[in-house]
Amino acid sequence: MLKKVLGIFLVTMLFVSTGYALEVGKVNVPESITAGGSDLVLNGAGIRSKFGLKLYVGSLFLPQKSNDAQAIMAADEPMAIRLNIISGMITSEKMEDATREGFENATKGNIAPIKSEIESFIAVFKEPIKEGDTFDLVYVPAKGVEVYKNGEAKSVVGNLEFKKALFGIWLCDKPAQKSLKEGMLGL
């Protein structure tokens, strides 16, 4: 029992926020978080929508604010993306398909070097996804991308090259959605 309580406490401390910076799609986005042992500030946030449906809020947290997408993707420093699911229309299958397409776009079709990491990452979406779920994708240098669903650690995936492609889903030249990229970059 004590071990379980300590585990909950540690996960809670992982995502400590200091207040809300803004509201996006009825989601209160914190001004900062502590993730992977680092204090990160909100860089920006936006809504991913498709066919007029609002699907999720994407928020980018960095050690210091930046609007340079290429530098953010390349940086070997702690950072995080938070996805707050705001639609019941998102299913595990749709999230998997969209993520695969995002990796294709982010790598310009060259997924071969990180194919096994992509499969490990996508496995997180095999569990049912529902409105209100939160995914935290936390890059920790020399460790990889820590993946959390609703504050529960799910896996650690990849290295810096994988992180570049993962963050590229939202920040590359062909992002998931241009307006979401601009929001995450604080533009």
Image: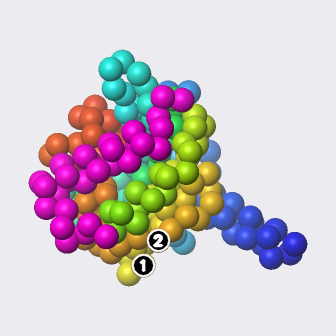
Q: Which residues are magenta?
A: 88-116
Q: Choose top left, top right, bottom left or bottom right for residue 113.
A: bottom left
**Rendered residue at 25%/46% (across/down):** 101
The answer to whether residue 22 is left or right of residue 142 is right
Amino acid type at mark 1 = Lys
**Rendered residue at 74%/64% (across/down):** 8
Q: Secondary structure at mark 1?
A: loop
Where does the image place residue 13, in percent across and percent down from the top left? Answer: 67, 64
**Rendered residue at 15%/46% (across/down):** 173
Asked if disc 1 and disc 2 are in contact, CB closer than 8 Å, the reply is yes
Task: Name the residue tied to disc 2.
Answer: 156
**Rendered image coloring scheme:** rainbow
Q: Choose top left, top right, bottom left or bottom right for residue 167.
A: bottom left
Amino acid type at mark 2 = Val
Task: Name the residue tied to disc 1.
Answer: 143
The correct choice, above or below, for 65 with respect to 54 in the image is: below
